[in-house]
Image (cartoon, rainbow, N blue to C red):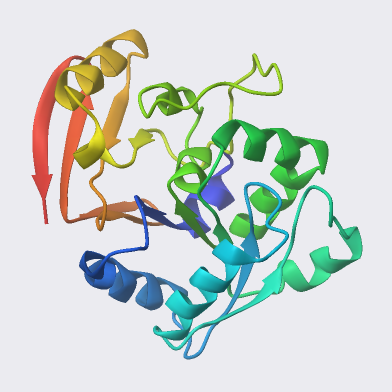
């Protein structure tokens, strides 16, 4: 991660966007974007032929007076010429779903470096569940969520915009505190556990937890409430 990316990085980590509890996090997101009626691009983690999830997210952002109008698929309907429209958006939404599949196609389509350039130039990234995990150094937290590996990926390194790991949906995971502690020890780092409706806002060097998160670092656990 270069200095420009740290200076300009604007990131929103969501566990999900399906609950009224996200409203406080939404306010922080809109402030982060800093523009009325922003245009948001959408990258799905896998093919969404019927646009089922895309339409749900369009309705979600419409309620925030934001326009989710650029759909950029990486698989069957991949159209590289549409990248120009994607990277002129005020923000880009990285969807939930299969983290492994998402990472595989981001690499295959050469999007990793393009997303780094986008952030370095002041673009806002919004990650939800799998999309949020992808913004961290690596994706092995998906194992705690019960996700099965795919595409024979052995290199789990991801976008690496932050120095922490992110575990969504902790309200649905059994024995989650011990799993967070174990991860922090084996990875010798820190991991935020996030319940649905809550999240993290990163603006430059600033990191703000929104809601009731848990932080595990080098085997020690503490609550982070804001």
Query: What residue sits 27% from the left and 11% below the top?
Result: 185
Residue 12 visible in the shown view: yes
Q: Horizontal placement of 112 versus 9: left or right?
A: right
Task: Return the residue nearer the eye: 204 or 128.
Answer: 128
Quarter holding the N terminus?
top right
| In the image: residue 100, left or right of residue 168 | right
- Residue at point 67%, 52% (across, down): 115
- Residue at 29 percent of width and 42 percent of height: 169
Residue 105 place in picture, x, y as percent: 74, 39
Left or right position of 29 against 190: right
Q: Residue furthest front?
A: 50
Task: Please state the horizontal and vertical placement of residue 154, each as a whole percent of the image.
Answer: 64, 14
How many numbered dots are placed on residues in this image?
0
Give the residue at the far top of this rendering. Answer: 186
Quadrant in the rendering for residue 98: top right
Q: Residue 90 lies in what quarter of the image?
A: bottom right
Please identify the quadrant where the C terminus is shown: bottom left
Q: Is residue 63 above or below residue 135?
A: below
Q: Is residue 214 above or below residue 209?
A: above
Q: Is residue 104 above or below residue 188?
A: below
- Residue 72, image x and y in percent? 74, 62
- In-image side of 154 versus 6 (left or right): right
Q: Is residue 122 visible?
A: no
């Amino acid at each position: 991660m270069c200095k420009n990316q740290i200076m300009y990085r604007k990131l929103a980590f969501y566990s999900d966007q399906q609950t009224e509890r996200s409203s406080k996090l939404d306010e922080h997101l809109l402030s982060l974007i800093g523009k009325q009626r922003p245009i948001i691009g959408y990258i799905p983690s896998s093919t969404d032929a019927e646009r089922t999830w895309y339409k749900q997210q369009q309705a979600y952002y419409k309620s925030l007076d934001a326009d989710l109008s650029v759909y950029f698929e990486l698989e069957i309907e991949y159209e590289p010429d549409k990248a120009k429209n994607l990277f002129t958006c005020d923000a880009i939404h990285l969807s939930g779903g299969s983290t492994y599949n998402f990472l595989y196609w981001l690499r295959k389509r050469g999007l990793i470096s393009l997303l780094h350039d986008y952030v370095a130039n002041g673009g806002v990234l919004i990650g939800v569940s799998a999309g949020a995990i992808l913004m961290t150094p690596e994706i092995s937290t998906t194992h705690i969520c019960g996700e099965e590996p795919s595409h024979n990926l052995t290199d789990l390194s991801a976008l690496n915009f932050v120095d922490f790991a992110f575990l969504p949906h902790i309200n649905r995971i059994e024995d989650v505190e011990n799993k967070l502690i174990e991860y922090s020890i084996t990875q010798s780092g820190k991991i935020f556990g996030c319940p649905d409706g809550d999240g993290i806002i990163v603006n430059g060097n600033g990191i703000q937890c929104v809601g009731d998160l848990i932080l595990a670092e080098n085997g020690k656990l503490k609550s982070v409430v804001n």
